[in-house]
Image: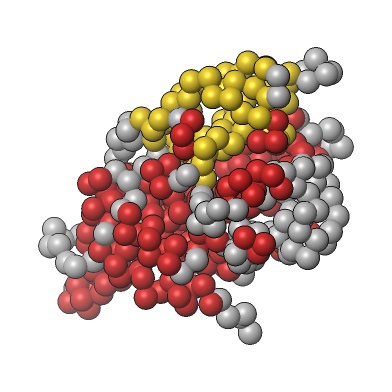
Amino acid sequence: MKKPNPLLEDLKPLLPTIAANAARAEQDRQVPAENIALLKGIGLHRAFQPKLYGGLEISLPEFADCIAALAGACASTAWAMSLLCTHSHQLAMFPARLQEEIWGTDRDATASSSIAPFGRIEEVEGGLLFSGEMGWSSGSDHAEWAIVGCRRANAEGTQDYCFAVLPRSDYVIRDDWHAAGMKGSGTKTLLIDKAFVPEYRIQKAKDMMEGKSAGFGLYPDSKVFYSPYRPYFASGFSTVSLGVAERMLQAFREDRQPRARLHRRRGWRSHPRIDAPGRVHPPGGRRAGLSRKNLAGARRPQRPPPVPQPRDPGVLAHQPGLCGEDVHPGRGSPVRSRGWHRLVRGQRDAAPVARLAHDRRPCHTDYDVCAQILGRELMGLEPDPSMV
C-alpha cells in the first residue's frame, strides 16, 4: 500500500487557484506572488530544509508526487518552486554558520541558483570577490539568496568546481527572460560585481557528491542529508516533465472524448502522438526514476561513493526529453473546448522544460554527459571532475 503523503493532500486544494493564475504567470514572466504565498503556506518550500529550522525532510518520491501535481496546474510555478525547494538540500551541506545565517532569522528563506561555473573570481583574504552575469536563475524574484558557480584554483595546479552563496543584497536581477514556453518561470540573470564571499559560504561540488562537505554529518538522524546533492537538485526536472505530460493527457481526453464518440463510425484520427505510453507512466511510476538505491543510501550515515549510482542520473536526464518529444496536442477540429487551452500551453511548456534541463544545467540532465559518467564507471575509469 502506498504511503500517505500529507503534503500532497495539502497541495491539492491549491491547484485550481494556481491553474487559474497560469495565464498571469505567462504575462508577468514570473511566478505570481500569490502562488508562492500559497505554497509556502503549506510548507512546500521546507521539503528539504533541516528539521532544526522547521523543515520537513520528506523523501524524494513524496516530493516528486507534489511537483508533478503542481506542474499539472502550472509548469512554470512547478519548475521555479521545485528549485527553490531542492536548493535547501544543497544549502544543508554548507557549514552550520551559513545555515544559521540563512534560516536562523528567516525560516522561510529560499535560494535560487545559477550553478554553471561562469563566475569570475579574485582571491582575497578570507574568501573571494565574485563577479559575473549569471544566467538562468529560475524563481530568483522570490529568493533571498543565490547559489552561483565558479572554478577555483587548488594546490594541485588544477581547478575545483565550486558553489558560492550570496545574499540578495549582493546582486541585481536583470529582467531578461523572454521565452516561448515556461514563460512564468522567471529564469532571469543575476548581475554580480565584485561581491565578497567569505570562505564559509563556499563549497566544492565534488565534496557535496562524496560526503566531504562541511555540512556532512550535521544531522545524524536525517534520512535525506547523507545523499549527494545531485539527485535532489535534478529531481524536479523529470517530475515537471511528467506533470506536463500527465496534464496534456488529461486535457486531451476532456477535449476529444465527445468528438471521439461522435465520429467513431468514420474512424478517429485526432490523437496525441504518444509513441510509448509507458514513458509517461513507466513501471513503478516516477518513483522508479528517482533511484531507490540512492534513497536507501541517503538513510545511512556514511559517505556516498565517488560516483553515486551512475545509472540514476541517466534516468533523470532521459525523462524530460521523452515527455517533451512524445506528447503533442494532435490534429483535429478547430473547435476550442475548455481543455484546448491547456493542451496548447502544455505543448509550449513541454519542449522548453527539456531544453532548460539540458542547456541550463547540463551536468545533471544532459543524457550524453550522464551516459559518459556511467561509461567511465563501467570501464573502471576515474570520474571526470568536469562532470560532477
Q: Where residue 4 sits in the image (x, y, percent)? A: 58, 80
Image point 59% across, 20% down: which residue? 129
Residue furthest to the front? 105
Q: Residue at x 51, y 50 (%)?
A: 110
Asked whether residue 129 is in view, the answer is: yes
**Residue 360 in view in this figure:** no
Say above or below: 47 vs 387. Answer: below
| 91 sits left or right of 77 in the view | right
Number of numbered discs visible in the structure rendering: 0
Whole-percent x and y of residue 67?
A: 48, 61
Side (left or right) of 105 relative to 323: right
Along the viewing direction, whichever of 321 and 218 lies nearer the viewer: 218
Q: Residue furthest bottom?
A: 1
Quadrant placement of the N terminus: bottom right
Q: How is the image coloured?
A: secondary structure
Quarter of the figure with the C terminus: top right
> Which image quadrant for residue 375?
top right
Q: Position of residue 318 (x, y in %)?
A: 57, 48
Q: Identify which residue, 114 or 217, lies in the foreground.
A: 217
7 vs 33: above or below: below
Query: Where residue 291 sits: x, y (%)?
Result: 69, 59
Q: Is residue 251 left or right of residue 60?
A: left
95 or 88, which lies in front? Answer: 95
Q: Nearer the viewer, residue 34 or 100?
A: 100
Q: Quadrant of residue 364?
A: top right
Q: Residue at x 23, y 54 (%)?
A: 23
Q: Quadrant of residue 175?
A: top left
Residue shown at 80%/46% (left/top)?
A: 211
